[in-house]
Image (cartoon, rainbow, N blue to C red):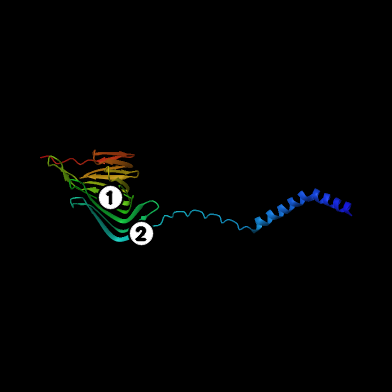
Amino acid sequence: MITILRQLWDRLTLYLPVLLMGLLAMTTYWLVRSTPQLVAPEATAQVRHEPDYFMRKFAVKTFDASGRLKSEVSGGEARHFPDTDTLEILQVNIRSYDEIGHLTTATASRAITNGDASEVQLIGHAQVVRAATLDKNGQERPALTFTGEFLHAFMNSERLKSHKPVELSRGKDRFTGDSMEYDNLERIMLLKGRVKGLLIPGKFP
């Protein structure tokens, strides 16, 4: 009897590692099935191009430190888009005065300005008019008018650009081009493409 028990024990000892490995595999499988699955992280929500506030039939005025009117912006509707930090204005009308008090106006069907208003894109029936002024000798400088479907104004550097056809009027003189760059500080204008000009001679005494 003792001999038989010893033989059974020897066989059990021989197969014990196999039995333990099987038990371990079954336990591991049960743990995997029973453990709750980790929730996959939600995809980062895409920022939508939607306005976070709007204004209708508005007018905004800015003044310098001395209380002098610097600019006035009005429009039919304005919408701010936080994803691009831009302000879109419909039926825009802008009046701006330089340090000397010279007036420049801008109108368009739509305008897009960046966060600090240093750049303004005028879209659709765009027009920028610099009012007539007097030079240092007291001679009149005729009004300067830019007209086109797109005008890009850089307010800090007083530059105006367009990659689309533009018409320039200075008094009775007319110029047209397929694109334009104008520097108001340097009084330099560059017309490119099919450029045409009409100069009206002044009156002689």
For the residues carrying marks 1 and 2, which lies nearer the camera in this image?
2
Residue 176, given in percent of the width and then of the height, sits at: 29, 43
The furthest residue to the front: 2
Name the residue at 88% across, 51% down.
3
Residue lying farthest bottom?
Answer: 56
Query: Foreground residue, 93 or 14?
Result: 14
Q: Residue at x 71, y 55 (%)?
A: 26
Q: Amino acid at mark 1?
A: Gln
Give the labeled residue for mark 1: 127
The local secondary structure at tag 1 comes to: strand
Position of 167 compared to 19: left or right? left
Tag 1–tag 2 contact (CB < 8 Å):
no
- Which residue carries the number 2 mark? 53
In this rendering, position of residue 18 left or right of residue 176? right
- How far separated are the C-alphas under marks 1 and 2? 27 Å
What is the tally of numbered marks visible in this picture? 2
Task: Characterize the local packing of mark 1: few (<14), some (14-19) or many (20 or more) Cα atoms within 10 angstroms.
Answer: many
Relative depth, front residue between 33 and 20: 20
- Say what secondary structure mark 2 lies in: strand
